[in-house]
Image (cartoon, grey):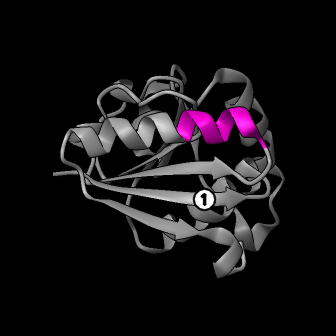
Amino acid sequence: MTEVAFHFNAPDKLAYACRFARKVLRSEMRLVIAGPEESLDRLDRMLWALGPSDFVAHARSGGDEDMVAASPVLLTADPRESSHQDVLLNLGHNVPEGFARFQKLVEVVSAHDDADRQAARERWRHYAGRGYEIVRHDLVLKGG
């Protein structure tokens, strides 16, 4: 069964996604980051702007097939498009389609966006109602 974790109180969800991607790459796992296209556009630019020692190799779904297949990080609006199955990071408001095929699902929740927080409560109820054990990480207590 997929491990579900909620990372609450992210001051900036996209900056957190960048840090999370670096961490996952160090563990030699593959990461799919799902979210709305406009968020993925911004995240893509942020990942390219990281310094040389922080570089995160990534690709966008719909891009060159060889690049997408080789990339350790994939940005996509639809995680079902990916062959990766290690970690799924959700930046969207809805339960991502096909999340159950991943080993781990991480839901990132804003510290300040009430609509995002309410959507996260709905996703939490969805997973809990289907028997998923949920791990809670408060990013304020962890220092972001």
Kind of residue sitting beneath label 1: Phe
Magenta span covers which residues? 113-120
Residue 124, quarter of the rendered image: top left
Q: Position of residue 27 (x, y in %)?
A: 42, 73
Q: Position of residue 99 (x, y in %)?
A: 31, 37
Q: Which residue is mark 1?
A: 8
Magenta region's main secondary structure?
helix
| Crowdedness near tag 1: few (<14), some (14–19) or many (≥20) residues, C-alpha within 10 Å | many
Q: Nearer the viewer, residue 5 or 98?
A: 5
Q: Residue furthest bottom?
A: 142
> Does residue 33 lie above or below 62 as drawn?
below
Q: Residue at x 37, y 24 (%)?
A: 81
Q: Is residue 36 visible?
A: yes
> Does residue 85 lie above or below 115 as drawn?
below
Q: Position of residue 66 (x, y in %)?
A: 42, 33
Q: Nearer the viewer, residue 125 or 26?
A: 125
Residue 53, quarter of the rendered image: bottom right
- Placement of the C terminus among the 4 image quadrants: bottom right
